[in-house]
Amino acid sequence: MQTSNQRNIRSRGMRKYSILAAVVICLQAATVRAEEVVRVACVGDSITYGAGVANRGKNNYPKVLGGLLGAGYESRNFGVSGATLLKKGDHPYWRTGAFKAATEFKPHIVIIKLGTNDSKLQNWKHKAQYAIDLAALVDHFEALPSRPKIWLCKPVPVYRDRWGITEKVVKGEVIPLLEGVAKKKKLPVIDLYKALSGAKEHFPDGVHPNVKGAEILAKAVYKAIKGAIEGPIKGKVKRTAERLPAKAGS
């Protein structure tokens, strides 16, 4: 027969074991969460950044995209207001801290949305370099150890020419050049121009979408990429993974 002291010792031992088991389970869960992360880099200008979006930190399109993708994905905003794709533009994305940060993020997926600010006269005088610089940006990300999947985005419509940004150049020149690069590089294109056509009411200043516009944008991006990310991942993707496992048959 156990003495009272022996029962107390056993009870304390069981409690310690239960606590230890709970800690181990929590650590294992945390490890799974840390491992099962697909990194999505949203590269772009002020529209990606979320300029003009109320409560920007919560409602910018990369943030909304992250919510749509759900657990297992980390969608990060690398947008820079005023940024140009053109290396000779007045604010080249290449020279920004966001470009460096996006590179160091080691993304598995890269969404590139640049071109609106390139339409400004002082930038578009270098239009002969646009396709070259876009191809170079694609090459840069494709060369990363993570070997990310890349999508190019057509710029959204310009409902009011402002700050030198013009609808004529965006629609008539930037988009065709982007399509040419996408075709040559065999990259998918997300048609944000079409997605936000007829949505003038969601562009208060004529250039930047509001909360609703950002939501439409995020949903368009999600719809375009979900086919490539639903089901391709077998097992776990470590936070430090060198690449995103390809979808079968791709």
Image (cartoon, grey):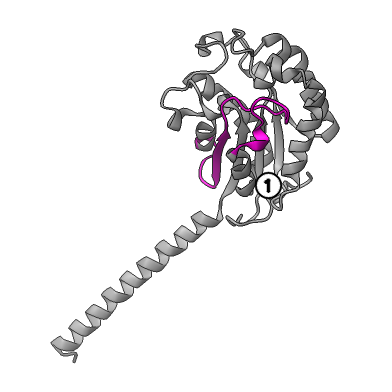
Q: Tell whether 16 sits left or right of 111.
A: left
Q: Residue at x 56, y 25 (%)?
A: 46
Q: Is residue 136 above or below residue 38?
A: above
Quadrant of the image occupied by residue 219: top right
Of helix, strand and loop, which one carries label 1? loop
Q: Position of residue 178 (x, y in %)?
A: 77, 25
Q: Which residues are magenta?
A: 67-96
Q: Tell whether 148 sits left or right of 26.
A: right
Q: What amino acid type should be assigned to the residue bearing mark 1?
A: Pro
Foreground of the two, 2 or 24: 24
* Image quadrant occupied by the N terminus: bottom left
Q: Is residue 143 visible?
A: yes
Q: Residue at x 32, y 71 (%)?
A: 18
Number of marks present in the image shown: 1
Quadrant of the image occupied by residue 188: top right
Does residue 237 belong to the magenta stretch? no
Q: Position of residue 85 (x, y in %)?
A: 70, 29
* Image quadrant occupied by the C terminus: top right
Foreground of the two, 133 or 147: 133
Does residue 91 belong to the magenta stretch? yes
Q: To which residue does mark 1 refer?
A: 232
Q: Tell whether 6 sits left or right of 70.
A: left
Q: Position of residue 43 (x, y in %)?
A: 62, 34
